[in-house]
Amino acid sequence: MDATFWHARWQQNELGFQLEAAHPLLQKWLAHVDSGKGPVLVPLCGKSPDIQYLANFSSVVGAELSPIACRDFFIEQNRAFTQTQVGDFNCFQGDAITLWQGDFFALTPQHTAGCSFVYDRAALIALPETMRQQYARKLQQLLPGGSRILLITVEYPQHEKQGPPFSVYREELESLFPTAAIEVLEKLNITGKGFARRRFDTSTLFEVAYCITLP
């Protein structure tokens, strides 16, 4: 999944991953995972309504490749914002929300200063296997020890459907975060119900929420 793929999805409005409201697993488990002591980092955030929900409780730092997604988030949520060029990134900033538009892998700890909580609903599972390894390493570089990740994955027989979203099981998470504490919060059977706006013709489909605590 290179940048061209995702830019094309936004340009063509092919947003099968987009939800209309904050994810129910986020609403249920946020207080359990987040200490509320600092801003929340939302990688590959798109224009997710989860950003708006999170901003009710703390400031939000989002990272997103598409300028369309960043602009549309503020417009659709009726939030005032400014747009400035900061190094290699466009910075879309409004009250309590900062979206860094550019290459996630080019982020530095300065971009994510103060963040010790990550919310990931559709970042890890949007990436093929080799990029998932890069992504996990990058998160661990950006975050201080003791940081927590509220991660939502999907599980299905990968051979039955081409991602994204890709199927990610706990065994892979243990490989990606080998020294972290990984807790399963909830596992939902959504077989036959689809994923966001997309229908999944797979024999099984689960959505799983995890709390990952970095050492």
Image: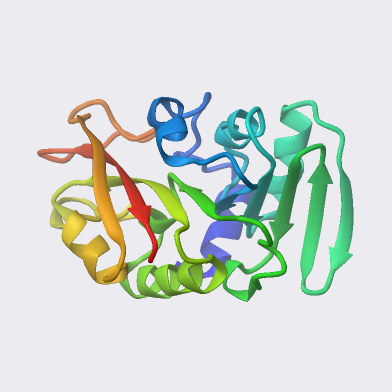
Res 61 seen here:
yes
Res 164 seen here:
no
**Exactly how many numbered labels are in the figure?**
0
Horizontal relation, residue 127 to residue 99: left or right: left
Pinpoint residue 117: horizontal percent, then vertical percent.
52, 50
Horizontal relation, residue 64 to residue 156: left or right: right
Looking at the picture, does residue 44 appear above or below residue 75? below
Residue in the picture at 69% in, 62% down:
113
Pinpoint residue 49: horizontal percent, then vertical percent.
58, 31
Question: Which quadrant of the view contains residue 91?
Answer: bottom right
Looking at the picture, does residue 125 appear above or below residue 86? above
Looking at the picture, does residue 48 appear above or below residue 44? above
Question: In the picture, which quadrant includes the C terminus?
Answer: bottom left
Question: In the picture, which quadrant includes the N terminus?
Answer: bottom left
Horizontal relation, residue 116 to residue 193: left or right: right
Residue in the picture at 72% in, 69% down:
110
Colouring chosen for the image of the structure? rainbow
Residue in the picture at 22% in, 51% down:
161
Looking at the picture, does residue 75 appear above or below residue 3? above
Q: Nearer the viewer, residue 59 or 152?
A: 59
Identity of the residue furthest to the left in this view: 203
Q: Nearer the viewer, residue 43 or 117?
A: 117
Pinpoint residue 89: horizontal percent, then vertical percent.
76, 67
Horizontal relation, residue 154 to residue 55: left or right: left
Pinpoint residue 100: horizontal percent, then vertical percent.
71, 58
Question: Which quadrant of the view contains residue 87?
Answer: bottom right
